[in-house]
Image: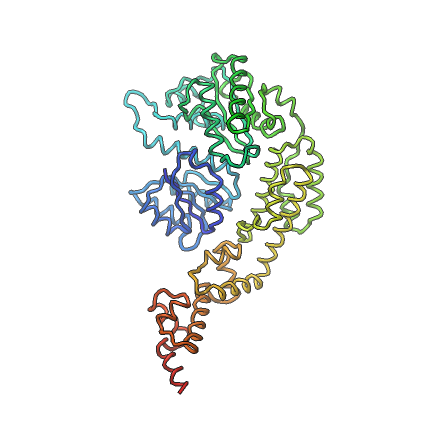
Amino acid sequence: MKVLIVDDDYNIINMIKGMIPWENLGIDTILEAENGKLALDVVGKEDPDIIISDIEMPVMDGIAMVKALSEDETHNPELIFLTCHADFEYAKMAVHYGVCEYLLKPFPAEELIAVLSKTIVRIKEKKKPEESDTNAVAGEYAIKGFIRDLLDGNAYTQGGDIKGLAAKYGLEFENDMPCRIIAFGMDFGMAPPDFSRNDLTFVFKNVANEVLFGTVEEKDFNFTEYYLADYYTAYHILNERNYDRNDLNSKIRRIDAVLKSYIEVGITGVISGEILPPDIAKTKREMEEVFIRSVTTSGGIYELEDAEKSTSYTKDKLALKEIEGYVRDRKKNEFLVYMRNYLEGNGATLSQTELKKLQHELMQVFYGFFSESGISSGDLLDDETGRKLYGSACLGSVYMMKYASYMYDYTVKEIDKVRESGSVTDKIKEYIREHFAENIGRTEIAEYASLAPNYLSMIFHKDTGMTLREYINRCRVEEAKKLMDITNLNITEIALQVGFENISYFSTVFKKLTDVSPADYKNKRKADEF
């Protein structure tokens, strides 16, 4: 399966590529494009199954791109929009042209994973022919989508007749059928560095399938997976008539022991009480709360009710809007006091997993400012101090305070740098003067300046009255004139040396900037020497 990511900020593309377990989702090809026009070219050549696209881009934006796709009867990819704007008009236009999902930046990885999973189910359903004798849609992906909808609370939005809805997927399920949820949790942060996330989840699912279901052949719908920061959870809905507490506890202990022997990381098992299908989504949310508390980092098996009691505490939610205000108003002391009070109030009960979630929430606040100011987040952890603070933030409250202070200082510094656009423009000019002979363009310069390409172009043009390409060409022509003055190189050699690959284009640009052709300029200089 192929996915095309469309965004004019290459850092966003790289972030998305790195945050999703593509292989687990059955996606083997990741394509890229920096605007809608280039994306249409890729669609024509590669025919991707899914397009994940920004809306605001140069040349052709996302709305224009999906409009063009809606008129194309040859290609019919599923469309997911990512945008910073919670604008109803955007959403309305997106839906009109066939966009199936609409996410607001910044978004957590698990949200995009969930959207991709549902999208993949839709694709599989389209490709599976309906059986003539029944309305059942064949295939594990359809079943997996139905179970995810049950866990997320979406199944009942499609109608209250869960029996009829389940029958569509070839399952026996009724509103009054007693069931339980088994949830497994694994902390990726506890794993040895030589194991990837894909390795860890692959081993878990194979071991769990063998122990629980007696087969190493994995069934996609046996476990519904979610990702919370560095924490992995997998849910299985069990018919009450198949529930044997002692047998299940024994099997979960076996899974934990085998995992520890293979990958040095155990799992935590949580088992719900007896529930009915309408309560599945609520119970799953309660289990999520348990899974981000300290009880789940030590392994073990818990009944949900007991786990909630052993980890119950009143934790205030992080006031993200308040934090945004502190950054916007440059109130660092107030920000640090707020963070200290928050951590002191909850610190005794904050596990490493909970601290990771807190760190992720803080990052989204600061990334929001980066996006608003056109700042790329790619260089955020390039310095050694930043990397160390990022890696240690989840070790305790003191480390989290150091990380929060660093993120505040970094964000304010970068925002102020952009506001002083003259200094940014001087930096860009200096870079171009040093690299004009290379194959550089907006993307390379934006990477150097840590700015979004579109925002970079806007600042530079505002301060200089020139486009980036115009300034690069001016630098190249000035260097070409110098080479004509002091060397015996021919015009072709000079053009190539200063960065022009097309001699005709070099001549056109040279004459436009000097009012004479390269040949006339060189001949005049020779005549002046005599």
Residue 281 vertical placement versus 326 (above, below): above
Point out residue 356 in the picture as x, y percentages from the top left corner: 60, 36
Q: How many numbered marks have been drawn onto this rendered protein structure? A: 0
User: Residue 325 vs residue 523: left or right?
Assistant: right
Q: Nearer the viewer, residue 441 or 272?
A: 441
Could you tell me which residue is drawn at 71 percent across and 38 percent down?
341
* Quarter residue 342 falls in: top right
Q: Nearer the viewer, residue 53 or 389?
A: 389
User: Residue 467 vs residue 74: left or right?
Assistant: right
Point out residue 479 in the picture as x, y percentages from the top left corner: 45, 72
Q: Quadrant of the N terminus?
A: top left
User: Residue 369 vs residue 23: left or right?
Assistant: right
Point out residue 447 in the picture as x, y percentages from the top left corner: 50, 55
Point out residue 285 in the picture as x, y percentages from the top left corner: 55, 27
User: Residue reaching furthest bottom?
Assistant: 530
Q: Quadrant of the C terminus?
A: bottom left
Could you tell me which residue is drawn at 40 percent across and 82 percent down?
525
Q: Is residue 241 visible?
A: yes
